[in-house]
Amino acid sequence: MGDLLPQLAAVQVERVEASEDLLRITARTRDDAAVACPACGQPSNWAHSRYERHVADEAVGGRAVVIDLSVRRLYCENPGCEKATFVEQVPGLPRRYQRRTPALQAVVNAVAVALAGSAGARLLSVLHHVLAWASVLNCLMARFM
Ligand SMILES: [Zn+2]
């Protein structure tokens, strides 16, 4: 799996479900991995809770890919740190609040720059990524703001 989808090398893949047009991958970060606090750099694996993120990735084998990724909110163990808790980030997977992997976002950005709104949305749907034309336009606008 790590060779095929290197962005999942750092997580545990629990299930892969393939339908005609969708590959759904259920994965979770490792319980025992210490992660550096983004504010102070202190490593922590003291879990507060978990929640699931739904992330779109590049198509594989003619199917759209969705990753259901369980990530941890961790306590910062440094009593002098401003952050009480933080959410772990996974290399190769999007940062907080983003719904596409960096690889897929690069594809969407390239199409948005070349074709903008509805033409871009049509090309992306051929590439198995369904986006509204307004979303394609938003990606284009975000590059210049
Ligand atoms: Zn900290």
Image (cartoon, rainbow, N blue to C red):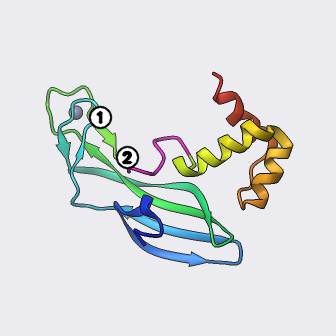
Q: Which of 60 and 89 is in front in this view?
A: 60
Q: Quadrant of residue 129?
A: bottom right
Q: Which secondary structure type mostly characterizes the magenta part of the structure?
A: loop
Q: What stretch is highlighted in magenta?
A: 89-98
Residue at the image point whose x is 78% and y is 57% from the top: 125
Q: In the rendered image, which residue does mark 2 sit on?
A: 89
- At which x and y percent is residue 84? 26, 34
Circle 1/circle 2 CB separation < 8 Å: yes
Q: How crowded is mark 2: few (under 14 residues within 10 Å), some or many (20 or more)?
A: some
- At which x and y percent is residue 124? 75, 53
Residue at the image point whose x is 85% and y is 43% from the top: 118
What is the quadrant of the N terminus in the image? bottom left
Q: Does the magenta stretch include residue 90?
A: yes
Horizontal arrangement in the rendering, residue 81 relative to residue 3 (left or right)? left
Mark 1 and mark 2: Cα distance apart in space:
9 Å
Badge 1 or badge 2: first in the primary sequence? 1
Q: In the rendered image, which residue does mark 1 sit on?
A: 38
